[in-house]
Amino acid sequence: MQSLFLFSITICLLRVAVAQEGFCSAPEILITESTYGKVTNPTLSPSHLQDLPGFTRSVYKRDHALITPESHVFSPLPDWSNALGAYLITPAMGSHFAMYLAKMQGNSKSAPPPNDVERFIFVIQGEITLTNVSSVSQTLMVDTYVYLPPNFEHSITCEASATLVVLERRYVNLKNYKTEQIVGSTDEQPLLETPGEIFDLRKLLPTSMPYDFNIHIMDFQPGEFLNVKEVHYNQHGLLLLEGQGIYRLGDNWYPVQAGDAIWMAPFVPQWYAALGKTRSRYLLYKDVNRNPL
Ligand SMILES: *[C@@H]1O[C@H](CO)[C@@H](O)[C@H](O)[C@H]1NC(C)=O
């Protein structure tokens, strides 16, 4: 009995020694202090599953998809120079828009979207220079964004490195309305009323009729959740910028965290609860102002 006890103590000590050698050391906790740093440096918890062959949290279904960072595949963006893109949502899923991450490297330059396609760019990391048809250049930093109307001459360049989330859709023209270039930052946008709801809402684009989509920034403190269990005709593309929580999509309940992207087809039941210790913030595409017929 006593020898068994001694034996187990020896094993314990051995374990400690091995751990100090680094074999069994706890995974390093990435401390990312920069704004939205978790999007570009995600922690893939539970950490012991991170390297498990074949393991991913990504899911692709008829009416929704969850695309998590370990399944991102980057390839050169058509006609851009020194830039890689990972398309997270495309019409192949049933959406009428595309959402992708663009990683711009040193001396990189964008290419225009196809004809009649409008573009929205939000900076997640680094900084970029926007030059438009009036040859006016502006620097866009983290948390700033630009909306570019269809067939609007522009280029985005980057000297060091930057990560962007880009949304594009074919503009739905109506009564010859025209949209305009819009440059802004999240902080500048006023908090809007959300009757019956508790989250903080900002809209990055005007709500007027010319605009056929909007981008919402939604903030939840841990423990806060959507009151309405929404089912609606609009489509969504979502990028979780900060925090963790549970997203309900149809009859599925997904643990999600910063860096995760979600496609929501029309009428998929949807609901979010923020959990963990920090604020949840997500960026949400929503089609608006057009008759669904
Ligand atoms: C180009 O950008 C500048 C700065 O944002 C803006 O004042 C100007 O209106 C833009 N040109 C056009 C044609 O939108």
Image (tube, helix red, strand yellow):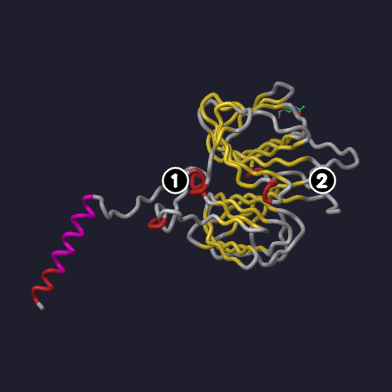
- Frontmost residue, 140 versus 118: 118
* Spatial separation of the CA atoms under disc 2 and disc 1: 37 Å
Q: 195 or 213, which lies in front? A: 213
- Write down the residue under mark 1: 32
In which quadrant will I find the N terminus? bottom left
Residue 119 shows which numbered tag? none
Q: Earlier in the sequence, mark 2 or mark 1?
A: 1
| Residue 31 image position (x, y, % from top left) | 41, 47
Pointer 2 residue: 208
Name the residue: 73% across, 34% down: 148
Neighbor class of circle 2 (other Cα within 10 Å; few <14, some 14-19, many 20+) is: few
**Which residue is most to the bottom?**
1
User: Dot 1: what SS?
Assistant: loop
Residue range of the region highlighted in magenta in the rendering: 8-21
Note whether 122 is above or below 70 in the view shown.
above
Residue farthest to the left, as pictured: 3
Amino acid type assigned to the residue bearing label 1 in the image: Thr
**At label 2, which amino acid type do we have?**
Ser
Say left or right for 36 vs 288: left
For image coordinates 40% across by 52% down, the residue present is: 51
Predominant SS of the magenta segment: helix
